[in-house]
Image (cartoon, rainbow, N blue to C red):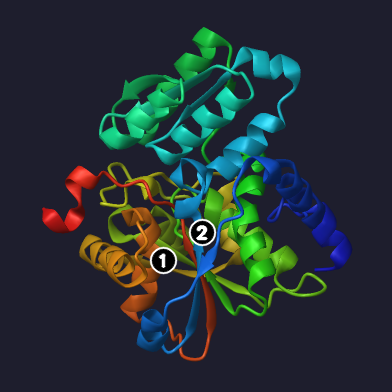
Amino acid sequence: MSPAELATGTPELPLGRRELEQAHQRLAPHVHRTPVHTSAFFDQRLEARLFFKCENFQKVGAFKIRGATNAVLSLSDEERRRGVVTHSSGNHAQALALAARQQGARAVIVMPSNAPAVKRAAVEGYGAEVRTCEPTQAAREETAAAAVAETGGILIHPFEDLRIIAGQASVAKELLEDVPDLDLLVPPVGGGGLASGTVLAARHFGSSGGGTRVRVLGAEPAGADDARRSLEAGKIVPLERPRSIADGLLTTVGEITFPILRAGLEGIVTVEDDEIVAAMRLIWERMKLVVEPSAAVPLAALLKGERKTRGLRIGVILSGGNVDLGHLPWNR
């Protein structure tokens, strides 16, 4: 792929380098440039050098504020007056609620009934209206569509939106700027917004000339492995009732994110809930970082040992830190 093609995008990679740079420039004044932490313990365990991009220190406690901010700032004045609508189990909900409030826009957020109470409380704290639905993808979409029809608001999908994906790409873009010569990036995979953004950032900023030297490995809960199944089948394979402690990763990949993942992921490693909890606890104990289960999935995938890590420089994306401290998973 030539530099010219990279600049303008392709059907599989619909966002070019210039678009990602513009999105990052647009949202940068409104979000944190989060730190990169290291751990001798995990380096020794995996015989590699690991660099953890700490989005748990981000506004609203997760990377989602990046995409939400880019999306809201991209609206016209007339669209902003109409307000915004979305569906989310928590982190995108919080992010869009805050981004909308900062721009003086109304936000209606559809949340599944099993969303963590701490996340719902945060959304309401940012001034958004919360509407509850059954914990299925179909129910989320139907309830959000009804809210759009009622309020006239603009739907800002959690991941099926190029403005969202461009914003999420800034996570890996910053990591690649701060830590040169990475061999591998490992994002968690839910709906695919962050993972798609990581693929695009790796392709456009991973090496001089826009090469593909930096590889991207997805990490997904075994109980919500629609992305792995979809990649194997060559088409989207939704799950009726995904189940995992990683509540932020229960959504199905979409028509926009799936082709990007198919074009750029070298594969997906799935992990069981007990492996996620073990990795989460190790991060808390060894790195003194508060991360949520979804954020621990990439490390759990590496610790599983299915992929060789010896000698590699690996960027691990810790996607968020919104935890219900009254219900820590190792206390169950």
Q: Is residue 275 above or below residue 144?
A: below
Is any part of residue 260 visible from this angle? Answer: no
Residue 113 left/right relative to 213: left
Q: Is residue 40 above or below residue 139?
A: below
Residue 260 left/right relative to 331: right
Where is residue 58 shown, x and y percent of the image? 51, 49
Q: Secondary structure at mark 1?
A: helix
Which residue lies under the disc numbered 1? 298
The amino acid at mark 1 is Pro
Name which residue lies at 38% across and 21% down: 130
Where is residue 240 shown, x and y percent of the image? 30, 42
Seen from the viewer's position, the closer of residues 6 and 198 is 198
Which residue lies under the disc numbered 2? 234
Q: Which image quadrant for residue 197?
A: bottom right
Name which residue lies at 42% across and 64% down: 219
Q: Is residue 47 above or below residue 319?
A: below
Name which residue lies at 65% across and 30% down: 72
Q: Secondary structure at mark 2?
A: loop
The amino acid at mark 2 is Gly
